[in-house]
Image: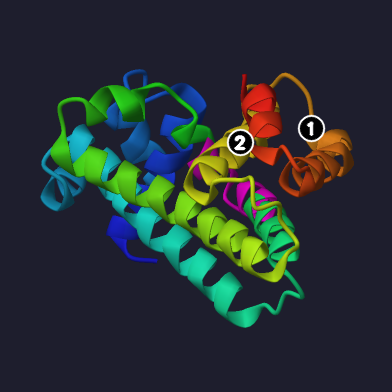
């Protein structure tokens, strides 16, 4: 592993566990086993490290979603939606520190003043929303999803529901895995109901 990668890996864990502001450069140096002077050789500031983590997260998540969709075969759009939900839950498990970081307030506070941070966050969520929207639209074409569902709006609401369940875990409230069967059943009910859009709005509210 290169020193740059070691810095980013250690910083992701520290930012996720302690928070951005609470993480010191001395801690990062100790955990990454990279001298502080070398850290500043690669990155001008702690903010630049954080933005680099988001950039890598963007690349990784988009690559993972593209690979999943291109390598998977679904009988219907509804099956594709449920496959995407399942894959997202898998990504949360396999990249735990990244999602802990994304569920903190700091990335969104920084995005208000840092254009690169905002760009990476928007790309991450646009990719997730776009994948769900594509699946919903396909389901309407093949008849597995109600025509009363608006794909773009429904994609965002579905993601909010799924991500809300995930945050029980990232906020250390409890392990939400027992809720997964009901989550999948709720997604299927909302998308196949004749009034699916209204059901989605009630669930999101």
Q: Residue at x 84, y 34 (%)?
A: 179
Q: Is residue 23 visible?
A: no
Residue 160: quarter of image: top right
Q: x, y percentage for residue 91?
A: 61, 54
Q: Residue at x 58, y 72 (%)?
A: 69
Q: Which mark lies nearer to you, 1 or 2?
A: 2
Q: Secondary structure at mark 2?
A: helix
In magenta segment, residue 92: yes
For the residues marked 1 and 2, what is the alpha-carbon distance in whole angstroms?
11 Å
The residue nearer to you, when weighing 135 against 66, is: 135
Q: Which residues are magenta?
A: 89-99
The quadrant the N terminus occupies is bottom left
On screen, residue 95 versus residue 87, left or right, reads left
Vertical position of residue 147 compared to residue 166: above or below: below
Labels 1 and 2: the sequence-earlier one: 2
On screen, residue 194 versus residue 33, left or right, reads right
Task: Kindly indicate whether the residue at mark 2 contacts the one at mark 1 (C-beta within 8 angstroms).
Answer: no
**Residue under circle 1?**
176
Query: Magenta stretch mostly in which secondary structure?
Result: helix
The quadrant the C terminus occupies is top right
On screen, residue 50 versus residue 166, left or right, reads left
Q: Secondary structure at mark 1?
A: helix
Vertical position of residue 60 compared to residue 22: above or below: below
**Residue under circle 2?**
163
On screen, residue 129 versus residue 179, left or right, reads left
Rendered image coloring scheme: rainbow
In magenta segment, residue 196: no
Q: x, y percentage for residue 187?
A: 75, 44
Q: Is residue 157 visible?
A: yes
């Amino acid at each position: 592993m290169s020193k740059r990668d070691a810095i980013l890996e250690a910083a992701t864990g520290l930012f996720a566990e302690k928070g951005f502001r609470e993480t010191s450069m001395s801690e990062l140096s100790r955990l990454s086993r990279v001298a502080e002077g070398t850290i500043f050789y690669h990155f001008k500031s702690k903010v630049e490290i954080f933005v680099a983590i988001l950039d890598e997260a963007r690349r990784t998540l988009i690559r993972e979603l593209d690979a999943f969709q291109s390598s998977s075969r679904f009988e219907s759009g509804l099956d594709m939606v449920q496959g995407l939900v399942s894959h997202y839950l898998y990504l949360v498990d396999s990249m735990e520190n990244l999602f802990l970081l994304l569920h903190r307030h700091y990335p969104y506070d920084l995005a208000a003043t840092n254009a690169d941070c905002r760009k990476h966050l928007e790309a991450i969520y646009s990719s997730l929303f776009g994948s769900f929207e594509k699946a919903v639209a396909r389901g309407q074409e093949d008849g597995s999803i109600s025509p009363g569902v608006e794909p773009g709006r429904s994609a965002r609401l579905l993601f909010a529901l799924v991500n809300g369940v995930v945050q029980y875990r990232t906020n250390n409230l409890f392990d939400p895995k027992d809720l997964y069967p009901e989550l999948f059943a709720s997604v299927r009910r909302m998308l196949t109901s004749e009034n699916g859009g209204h059901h989605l709005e009630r669930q999101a509210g």
